[in-house]
Amino acid sequence: MRAPLWGIDRIRVAMLGVVLAGALAGSAPHPAATQEAASEKAVFRVVAFHQEGEEWRPVSSGTGFFTDKDGTGLTNAHVVYPVSRHPQRYRLLVTLDGVFFSADVMCATHLTHDPMGPQPARARIERDIARIRVTAPDIPFGQWVMRPPGGEPIVIARRHEGPLPEFATLALGGLPRSGESVRVLGFGNISAVPRRWSTEGTVGDHMTGDDGVRTFSMRFTLPPLPGNSGSPVLNTRGQVAGLFTWYFDLDRTMGLAIAGPELRRPCR
C-alpha cells in the first residue's frame, strides 16, 4: 500500500465567484440521530479566500469543529496553510448554517512541505493540527455568491451581523480502541456549495507518525472526499477520538486520524 496522501482541499476557481454585495439580513428521533444532530452544530466549514484585484475567491476548503464556546476550534494545519503562511494575501472564513465569520489562526503545526504544491514521493505522517478562533467578519462583502456558468447565482453564506453567539462544542476524548466504532462528520464536496457528509467506520491499527504523533487507521463505510480534512472522528459517546487528516490513495475506504489525546496540546 502506498503512503497516504494529504486531503488538501483545493477549489476550482473557474467555476466560482464572489459578489461584493451588501449583507442580507413528529415522531421522537432515535438517540443516535439526536446525538449526531447535536454534534453537527459544532462542526463547521473552513475556507481560505484570496484577493484578486477587486474580487475575493475561495482557494481551499476543509472542516473544523469548536472546542470552546467562544469560537475556538480545531482543524488541520494544511487546511489553513495559505492563511498561516501568507496572512497578507489570504483570509480565513468559517461558515456555519449559511452564515460566515472570519477566523484567526492562533497556531498551526509547521509542515515539512507546501501542501498546495506538488505532493512528495512519500507523504510524511506528521503532526498536522491548527487552532483557530472565530471573529467578526472582516472581509469586504456581505454575501458569498456562486455564479455557475449559465445558471442563476447561488448564495452560499451571508455575513454574520452583531455580537458573536455562543457556539456548540465537542469534547475531546481518549485514544480509541482497535475495533471501536466511530463516526466522521464533515463537509465533503469541493465546490462552493457546502454539503454535509458523514460516514461510519471501525478503528484499525494504532501507529506512530514520523515525528512521534499518535495516529490510528479507520475503515469507512463510505469513502471520504476532499473537504473532509479536519473532520472530527467521534466515538459512541460523541467525544472526539481523533482528527481525520489523511486517506489512502489506493483504497479510499481507508484513512488515518490524529489521535484525540494529541489534540489537547495542538501546537506544541
Image (cartoon, rainbow, N blue to C red):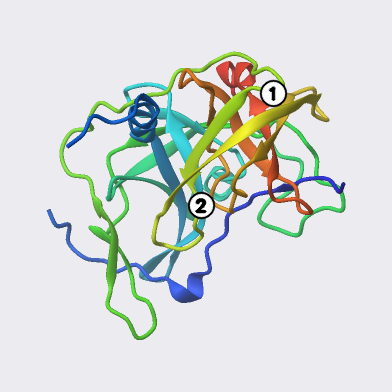
Q: Nearer the viewer, mark 2 or mark 1?
A: 1
Q: Which residue appears at 49% of the width and 70% of the height?
A: 13
Q: Secondary structure at mark 2?
A: loop
* Residue found at x 68% / y 42%: 246
**Residue lying furthest front in this view?**
27
Q: Quadrant of residue 256?
A: top right
Q: Are marks 2 and 1 in contact (CB under 8 Å)?
A: no
What residue sits right under mark 2 in the picture? 188
Q: Work out which quarter of the rendered image holds the C terminus and state it.
A: top right
Separation of marks 2 and 1 at Cα, in angstroms: 25 Å
SS for dot 1: loop
**Mark 2 vs 1, N-terminal side:** 1
- Residue type, mark 1 in image: Gly
Looking at the image, can residue 206 be seen?
Answer: yes
Which amino acid lies under the numbered mark 2 shown in the image of this protein? Gly
- Is residue 267 something that shows in the picture? no
